[in-house]
Image (tube, rainbow, N blue to C red):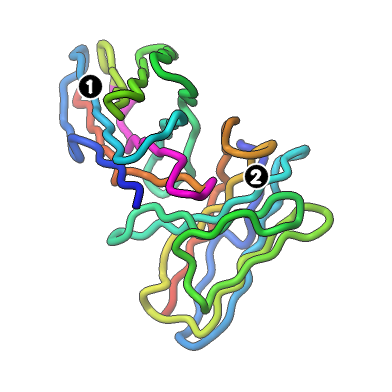
Amino acid sequence: DSGVTQTPKHLITATGQRVTLRCSPRSGDLSVYWYQQSLDQGLQFLIQYYNGEERAKGNILERFSAQQFPDLHSELNLSSLELGDSALYFCASSVETLNTEAFFGQGTRLTVV
Amino acid sequence: ELKVEQNPLFLSMQEGKNYTIYCNYSTTSDRLYWYRQDPGKSLESLFVLLSNGAVKQEGRLMASLDTKARLSTLHITAAVHDLSATYFCAVVGGGADGLTFGKGTHLIIQP
């Protein structure tokens, strides 16, 4: 157990809908990262938050957004969902930046039908 | 754009053999990470390599980093079935703190 908690574990929804994925980082970790893993794209970095502020953006679509709250948990919002958004979404956390290890949660498997 | 290439992408080997997975990356970075992923599971951190010449070992796995060659290797010694998994290398760079991952090496170790 990495100490990073993601909910829900599985999510099935219809095209055009909006969903929210939640991540609680390890105790003491200030950075939260979101990644998408799919068969065709592999593991892709989406976005990073550090202590409540957006720190870096990767290949995140405009339909996707995220935020980190004062208690350091983070949410990834996915809207106007398409079939191609079906993937495993991981959250990771680290103490500060990536000079230290990043620990990954169990992931949320999103299926868009 | 930072690119990370792993090879081989698929490896089937016998127990007791040695093998090496290679990870090349395209831009300067002095931080390289190796992760293991079992099917349908999360990513488990194996090694964090933070400087040129860094070498780390854990059990039958040893990882090294050559920042001048932009190359990291993950060496498996006397493989056992329990090491069957997908192994990813990842690099920080390209102007963001996010990890750029290779495509992964799917390793199957046959008894």
Q: CA distance from mark 2 to mark 1?
A: 31 Å
Q: Residue B91 in the image: state x and y as whole percent.
A: 42, 38
Give the position of the N terminus of chain A as an image quadrant: top right
Residue in front for this viewpoint, B7 or A22: B7
Question: Where are the magenta residues, as a range?
Answer: B81-97
Please indicate whether residue A82 sits to the left or right of residue B6 in the image: right
Of helix, strand and loop, which mostly describes the magenta segment? strand
At horizontal 16% and vertical 25% (from top left) the residue drawn is B13
The amino acid pointed to by label 2 is Val
Please indicate whether residue B79 sits to the left or right of residue A5 in the image: left
Q: Residue A23 in the image: state x and y as whole percent.
A: 66, 55
What residue would you read off at disc 2? A4
Chain ID of residue with mark 2? A
Residue in front for this viewpoint, A100 or B44: A100
Q: Secondary structure at mark 1?
A: strand
Asked if marks 2 and 1 touch (Cβ < 8 Å), the reply is: no
State yes or no: residue B89 in magenta.
Answer: yes
Q: Residue A110 in the image: state x and y as whole percent.
A: 48, 67
State yes or no: residue A28 in magenta.
Answer: no
Any mark on residue B20, and which? 1
